Image (spheres, rainbow, N blue to C red):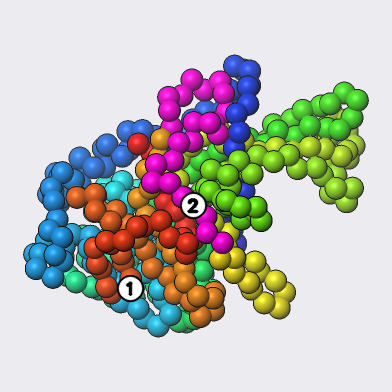
Amino acid sequence: MYQNFQQLKTGSNALQLDITESSSSNIKRHIDNEVTITVEHETRRKRKIPNSSSTVPDDLRKQKDRHGLCGLKNLGNTCFMNSAIQCLSNVSQLKNFFLSDYWHQMINHKNPLGTQGQVAQDYADLMSDMWLSNKNSITPKRLKTSVANFAEIFTGYSQQDAHEFMHFLLDALHEDLKDDTNDSSPISKLFYGRTISIITCVSKKRHVEQVEDLFTYLPLTIPTEQPLTVQQCLTNLSAVQIASSNSEWFCSKCRKKRQSKKQMYLFDLPRVLILQIKRFNYGTQSTTKITKFVQYPLELNLTPFIIKGQNLQEMIYDLIAVCLHTGSLSGGHYFTYAKHERNDQWYCFNDSSVTLQQQDIINQNAYILLYKQR
């Protein structure tokens, strides 16, 4: 399971590109627009979840209705897990799905890459406690135990990477809920996107091939120049890569290894976009952290980065959650800013503490950004 989810990690590039109708039609869009609507209506009908237009009082100490404003107790350096869970808890489509009874019907007990529904069950129970119990804070021990049973790195109580935990959790849920007939799940329909790599053979004939890849997040490398924004990082992903002499690409038309130019482009965008700001450089002896401020917008327009030829409308994304990291990787701390669906207020989820975020949510310590398609 742990090795399997690592294979989904991929960097993706974004730029406009003209493609022919034939090549565009061969790539089918697999994000299901109806799942979200169906699940949200199912959730409100069965569990009577209040409509998102209702409000939550600002004074958390006096309010009786704390749906979703529930802290997670630190079990001992488990802030990385708490922060990742709070980010995903505020993805309304995902939360509503697990608050419904529909997810039970989708468990794939025969999938050897899944957890036989164990992680899905514990995650659903946790969402129920966080959104339906009115508790100030709860202990996410069962979910941690089930995750650790399938990913040894998360055993014990040492500090780990919040993004790695989030990525594993989503992959485990995907495998638990996957439809074997088409390899899709509610997770893939929400979080999976697709890139196209255009590889050009550096020969006189300039052969061109296209390679498709799925992604569950986009890694944003931090360059050295100033100023720096998320949009600049996305543009940098489109930089042309020249294969070195020791990593030449095998051209199927030339039938031999050739030097090549490779460029990656966004094609199929997910409903929920996860961006990882790559702050950690992992060396053989030590890990260093890049503390540079990366400016991120509340509203992200991805239209300029989409391949032409899809006849898509403007693709606007709204920021819904930010995972932040302070200090070093081994001794630092994770916490989350997230926008509550019922009043559009931002809250700070810091382990067992949940407070209204009065200050600006644009923060130098941002590590993971979650955007929801408008």
**What range is drawn magenta here?**
292-315
In front: 43, or 230? 230
Q: Nearer the viewer, mark 1 or mark 2?
A: 2
Picture coordinates of residue 6, whole percent (x, y)? 59, 58
**62 shown above or below 21:** below
Q: Is residue 295 magenta?
A: yes
Disc 1 or 2, which lies upstream in sequence? 2
Q: Quadrant of the N terminus?
A: bottom right
In front: 334, or 112? 334
Q: Residue at x 54, y 76 (%)?
A: 328
Amino acid at dot 2? Gln
Q: Residue at x 43, y 24 (%)?
A: 313
Q: Disc 1 and disc 2: Cα gap in Å?
A: 25 Å
Q: Which mark is residue 101?
A: none
In front: 291, or 237? 291
Drawn side of residue 201 relative to residue 118, left or right: right
Q: Which mark is residue 295?
A: 2
Q: Is residue 162 magenta?
A: no
Picture coordinates of residue 11, whole percent (x, y)? 62, 48
Tell me the crowding category of disc 2: few under 14, some 14 to 19, or many 20 or more residues within 10 angstroms, Cα based: some
Drawn side of residue 304 relative to residue 138, left or right: right
Picture coordinates of residue 112, whole percent (x, y)? 51, 58
Picture coordinates of residue 7, whole percent (x, y)? 61, 54
Q: Residue at x 19, y 71 (%)?
A: 136
**225 shown above or below 78:** above
Q: Quadrant of the C terminus?
A: top left
Residue 98 in view (yes/no): no
Quadrant in which residue 212 is drawn: top right
Q: Residue at x 85, y 48 (%)?
A: 244
Drawn side of residue 270 relative to residue 232, left or right: left
Q: Which residue is mark 1?
A: 351
Amino acid at dot 1? Asp
